[in-house]
Image (tube, grey):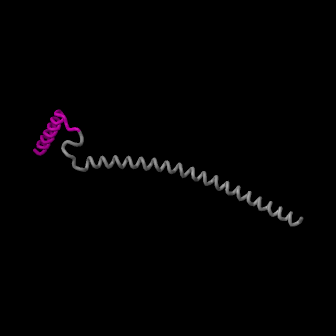
């Protein structure tokens, strides 16, 4: 009977150790789930930042290509209408006239 009771006591202590190990593992599992949730939230924020940066760099690249690379005559911004061309000519004439009068 002693050996049977010692086996039962030994099994009960093993069971209590296993229960405490299970509770520790459950706490670790909960902590890991929390960390996974934080990493998932950070991942979606990173995706948003990367998407925004790629859109901005795409826009900057298009602007650089438009302003820095040579454009064919029919491409780019809408040309000046006749009134604007005449105004530009008059402004140029006025600037040259002012420059000449300043030199005299």
Q: How many marks?
A: 0
Percent position (x, y) of residue 79? 20, 38
Tell me the quadrant of the picture where the N terminus can be found: bottom right
Question: Is 75 left, or right, of 17 in this rendering?
Answer: left
**Magenta segment includes 21:** no
**Which residue lies at the image location 17% right of the left edge and 35% below the top edge?**
87
9 vs 42: above or below = below
Question: Is 99 left, or right, of 76 in this rendering?
Answer: left
What span is colored magenta in the figure? 78-104
Which residue extends farthest right?
Answer: 1
27 vs 91: above or below = below
**Which residue lies at the image location 58% right of the left edge and 53% below the top edge?**
35
**Which residue lies at the image location 22% right of the left edge and 47% below the top edge?**
71
**Magenta segment includes 85:** yes
Question: Is 25 left, or right, of 103 in this rendering?
Answer: right
Q: Quadrant of residue 10?
A: bottom right
Q: Quadrant of residue 97?
A: top left
Percent position (x, y) of residue 5? 86, 63
Q: Foreground residue, 97 or 35?
A: 35
| Secondary structure predominantly adopted by residues drawn in magenta | helix
Q: Foreground residue, 48 or 9?
A: 9
Q: Foreground residue, 8 or 24?
A: 8
**Which residue lies at the image location 77% right of the left edge and 59% below the top edge?**
15
Which residue extends farthest left?
Answer: 104
41 vs 25: above or below = above
Percent position (x, y) of residue 89? 14, 38
Which residue extends farthest top?
Answer: 83
Q: Foreground residue, 5 or 77?
A: 5
Q: Quadrant of residue 104?
A: top left
């Amino acid at each position: 009977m002693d050996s049977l009771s010692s086996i039962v006591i030994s099994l009960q202590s093993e069971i209590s150790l296993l229960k405490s190990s299970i509770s520790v593992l459950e706490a670790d599992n909960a902590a890991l789930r929390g960390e996974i949730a934080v990493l998932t939230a950070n991942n979606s924020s990173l995706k948003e930042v990367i998407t925004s940066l790629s859109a901005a760099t795409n826009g900057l690249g298009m602007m650089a290509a438009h302003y820095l690379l040579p454009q064919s005559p029919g491409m780019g911004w809408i040309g000046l209408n006749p009134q604007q061309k005449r105004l530009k000519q008059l402004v140029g004439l006025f600037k040259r006239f002012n420059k000449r009068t300043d030199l005299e």
